Amino acid sequence: MDEDFFSRQTPYSDPGDFDTSGLPRAPRRLAALVRGLVIHRGEGGLFGYDVPEERLHHDAESRYVTEILRILRERGSTPLTEEHRAPGGRFVGTCRDFSLLLCSLLRATGTPARLRCGFATYLADGWYEDHWVTEYLAPDGVRRLADAQIHSGYDVPFDPMDVPRDAFLVAGDVWQACRRGRVDPETCGLSSVEKLRGLWFVHGNVLRDLAALNGVELLPWDGWEPWLRMGTPLTEDALAAADAVAAARSPDDRQRLFADPRLTVPAEITSYTPYLGTAGSRCPFAERGRLVEVEQPAALRAPPQRTAVCAAAVVLGVVGEVDQVRGELYASEGGDGDGPGAGLGGRGQGGDDGGPAPVPAGGAELVEVGVQQRPDPVGRAADLRGEQGEFALHRGLDGRVVLRHRSSPRA
């Protein structure tokens, strides 16, 4: 494990302004904390809790830890560092949310950690069940797998902080087993959903695991054309590429493979949300003659009172506003010279004075938000914080700029 790389937060795992000074440092205690803050949306019966439909449908669409923490703050006044909340005060998520939150807290307290996407053999008899866990560097220097979801309440024959590698298999290992005829692909996926299983499903998890190892921690149902579309038949090219990913063992090999346009996460993705239908995520505008992609926030599908209506970014030579209700980015149309916004073409209807394009009805005034430059493994990045919300903006090595929503505005 690249200790330095996996000690740094990603835009997905970054806890934002959450005070981590009161957190325990021991990985086991952090896992217990996560278990007490999150309930899986299929665990209502386990806890005797009738999960409200709105939470069932929307909570797990939260891409970022900042959004998970915001929801937790709304649902209880007890400190988040307390280990056990009643089910009604918890975030209703999936295995990915348990794993991402634990990964975030481990990184925040000095333990290198990363998400792993793969399959568990301990959740359904005879199945390789779609699952996510957290891989971390234990105090003894050994890389171990932790499953915060089963930290308590589950009868498993092993320590959830040291899941055996034959109990949880990373996606590449299951792929190789399927390709060699040792595992039936029709037993890989979701045992409860007939259409969500098969070699195409394993292939999708191979790409999601590769993305996580490169700092892009996707939602479990994120996909893209042409290879990560639900049920898509696999071509010989797709089979060979997944073979290469599954065989990769070094960070350099994984980084090289992730740079392949066929294997990387593109600017445009499709989220096959379990309850809310299919949602696209592409909103381009031109910045100095280049295309800038804006990732549509998952919060678009949440109730309006949960979302920031508008936010502004002034960083890396880009000025813009994001209307989260419509998912459009409005660039400043005015400005000459070299300052932020110079040369930007707006998508809104600009004023006669050449000023910023007006914000859609219900929006907010354009504001400058604080900018904090920080290292980023992909290229240049910045954290954007202001009263309108939190965003992360990246300029990749390919020159593309991506603005990603991180959290709703603070109360």
Image (cartoon, rainbow, N blue to C red):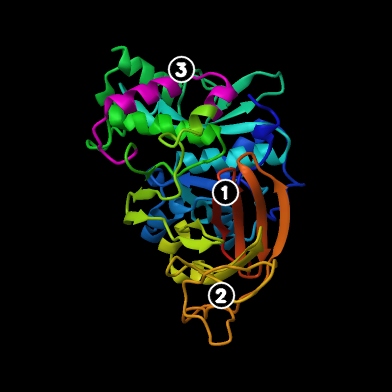
Q: Which numbered disc, 3 or 1, marks the residue that appears first in the sequence?
A: 3
* Quarter of the view holding residue 245: top left
Residue closest to the eye, 246 or 235: 235
Residue drawn at x 63%, y 61% is: 77
Name the amino acid, label 2.
Glu
Answer few, some or many: residues within 10 Å of disc 2's Cα (few below 14, many 20 plus, some between 14 and 19): many
Residue 399 is marked as 1
Answer few, some or many: residues within 10 Å of disc 3's Cα (few below 14, many 20 plus, some between 14 and 19): some
Could you tell me which secondary element the residue under label 3 belongs to?
A: helix
Residue 140 is marked as none
Answer few, some or many: residues within 10 Å of disc 1's Cα (few below 14, many 20 plus, some between 14 and 19): few
Could you tell me which secondary element the residue under label 2 belongs to?
A: loop
Q: Is residue 159 visible in this depiction of the protein?
A: yes
Q: Quadrant of the C terminus?
A: bottom right
Residue drawn at x 41%, y 43% is: 43
Residue drawn at x 42%, y 26% is: 171
Residue 247 is marked as 3
Q: Residue 268 placed where, x, y %? A: 41, 50
Q: In whole angstroms, how far apart are the C-alphas of marks 1 and 2?
A: 21 Å
Could you tell me which secondary element the residue under label 1 belongs to?
A: loop
Dominant secondary-structure state across the stretch colored magenta: helix
Mark 3 or 1, which is nearer the eye?
Answer: 1
Left or right: 76, with 206 as reference point: right
Q: Which residue is mark 2?
A: 333
Q: Is residue 51 visible in this depiction of the protein?
A: no
Name the amino acid, label 3.
Ala
Q: In whole angstroms, how far apart are the C-alphas of marks 3 and 2?
A: 49 Å
Q: Which residues are magenta?
A: 228-255
Name the amino acid, label 1.
Gly
Residue closest to the eye, 121 or 372: 372
Q: How many marks?
A: 3
